[in-house]
Image: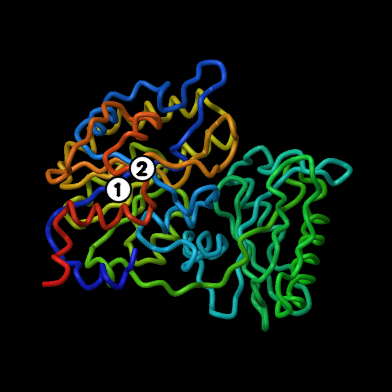
Amino acid sequence: MDLNLIKEIAISSPEKIVMLVLDGLGGLPDPKTGKTELETARIPHLDTIAKHGICSMADPIAPGITPGSGPGHLALFGYDPIANLVGRGALEAVGIDIEFGPDDMTARGNFCTVDDKGIITDRRAGRISTEKCTELCKLLDGIKVNGVDIKTYPVREHRFVVVFSGKNLHTELTESDPSQTGLAPLEVKAEATIARQTAPIINEFIAKAKAVLAHHHPANMILLRGFAKKPKLPTMQEIYKLNPLAIAVYPMYRGLARLIGMQVADAGTTLEDEIKTLKDNYNKYDFFFFHVKWTDTAGEDGAFDRKVKILEQVDAALPAITSLKPDVLVVTGDHSTPAVYGGHSWHTVPVVICGQFCRPDAVKEFSEPAFLAGGLGRIHSTDIMPLALANARKLTKFGA
């Protein structure tokens, strides 16, 4: 999508858009039943949305490409995720309100578990509590390497952010996370000549962190990825003339929303908290990014039944959203996280757009097989935003 074109024809209007993003929404069939999580779940309200809307399956990046959460969400908001790549470290840091300068470098971290041979047995250290994460971050805080000041900040559960402050730090680095168990953490290497002096600093920090954490099983090692500096992106106000609000529990998504100009609400910790936040703020904004993380977590954990249950919980809460009568309701995901796969995947993601001016198709249920026959066909995730704007009458005619 050409953001310059959208910027030319976007107008401010009172119509309201709610974009409900079920993280990791797409699934794959359970070998025992032949049904995906969506086909298995009892989701009558989502089925009703599908009946009254126009449906599609979307590619977040491109066919065959597995997206990270950052690129997947950027695409949903209409930003080319390849041209506007934002490092995970910066997203996490902004999400927890860390101030960092243009010369600082950030990284997203996981506490993990390694055995006595240094092999990763759990990439998330048993999802330790946030309180434990905070305690461990204090142990790592203040480590210095070659004059570089290093600060460690807790995010949530096993996740943390590291901010490296020093001169001539460069982000062109490989990650230490091999993204699977059964392997040792990887050595961080420079991907460009300019980063050759940065890579040893990161590796020495990791080595010092390992020594500090040696007796803190299950969180006895760290994994780093998403090395990044703070980006500069055009805002949703500038492009779309929107007054947007983000309702998200997890810091990374709050950070991404803040980077593109959204106001970020204090959304509590539960789905019920998020719905209350939406209701409390409904008259103040015209675009709402409503994020549900737990579908993705269940998929990553390989917990098929838990993902089904979460889908049913979201469905049960949906009337509280539709009762607000948004002019346009979008329900989709940033990527697929099939429980049978146990991680993000390249599979297309269900999308439904519902509003007064939608042209309904023949789809009768909210599921991947049904949406394959949707009226929008197969689209790119960056197409969702202009379609939502058009259906909310927020785009004028192009040309004479």
Q: Position of residue 235 (x, y in %)?
A: 33, 69
Q: Position of residue 35 (x, y in %)?
A: 47, 21
Quarter of the image where one finds residue 152: bottom right
Residues 284 and 153: in front is 284
Q: Between marks 2 and 1, how big is the CA–CA gap?
A: 8 Å
Q: Position of residue 211 (x, y in %)?
A: 83, 56
Whether label 2 touches label 1, CB < 8 Å: yes
Left or right: 332 as drawn, with respect to 5: right
Residues 197 and 364: in front is 364
Label 1 sits on a secondary structure element that is strand
Q: Quadrant of the C terminus?
A: bottom left
Residue at the extreme top: 32
The residue positioned 36% from the left and 49% from the top of the image is 379
Q: Which mark is residue 332?
A: 2
Residue type pointed to by label 2: Thr
Count of numbered badges drawn on the protein: 2
Residue type pointed to by label 1: Met
Q: Position of residue 141 (x, y in %)?
A: 68, 64
Q: Quadrant of the N terminus?
A: bottom left
Left or right: 84 as drawn, with respect to 166: left
Mark 1 burial class by Cα count in 10 Å: few <14, some 14-19, many 20+: many
Which of the two labelled residues, at mark 2 and mark 1, occupies the earlier sequence position?
A: 1
The residue positioned 29% from the left and 56% from the top of the image is 385
Q: Which mark is residue 19?
A: 1
Label 2 sits on a secondary structure element that is strand
Question: Where 95 falls versus 330 (above or below)?
Answer: below
Mark 2 burial class by Cα count in 10 Å: few <14, some 14-19, many 20+: many
Residues 235 and 116: in front is 235
Quarter of the image where one finds residue 15: bottom left
The residue positioned 51% from the left and 30% from the top of the image is 28
